[in-house]
Amino acid sequence: MNRYELGVVIKPDLEEEVFRAELEKVTGLVTRFGGVIEKVDEWGRRKLAYPIDKITDGVYTFITFNSPADAPSEIENRIRIMENVMRFLLVKLDE
């Protein structure tokens, strides 16, 4: 099992319950592909470095988890097609 961190930027104009549903989908993907979530760190609404589709803010969340080596590619493929996720980055953490 390797340790990973997933950073997700979700659209800021969503209602709270829709935002929670999107975040639940992302964490569900991690557990679905054999990951064990260590920590979910919600940073909240932050200004983006540059506008994305004329949106200047985003809601940042970082998820630290352990999973098998083949899980990150599957998670990335599923997150890539999520409509309300503006950007994401999945990195392997050093031991």
Image (cartoon, rainbow, N blue to C red):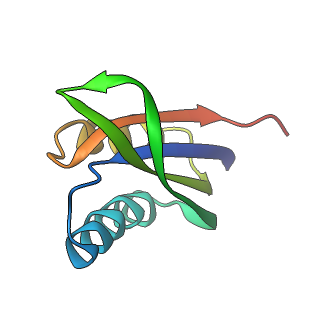
In which quadrant will I find the C terminus? Answer: top right
Image point 43% across, 32% down: which residue? 48
Numbered-mark total: 0
Say which of 76 and 45 sits in front: 45
Residue lying farthest to the bottom in this orientation? 17
Residue lying farthest to the top in this orientation? 50
* Image position, residue 10 (x, y; %): 32, 49
Image point 40% across, 36% down: which residue? 88
Residue 93 lies, with reference to residue 51, above or below; the image says: below
Residue 84 lies, with reference to residue 72, above or below; the image says: below
* Image position, residue 51 (x, y; %): 30, 24
* Image position, residue 93 (x, y; %): 73, 37
Residue 81 lies, with reference to residue 38, above or below; the image says: above
Say which of 50 and 70 sits in front: 50
Judge from the rendering whether residue 45 lies leftward or rightward of residue 62; answer left or right: left
Q: Quadrant of residue 50?
A: top left
Image point 18% across, 46% down: which residue? 82
* Image position, residue 67 (x, y; %): 58, 52
Judge from the rendering whether residue 12 lies leftward or rightward of residue 84; answer left or right: right
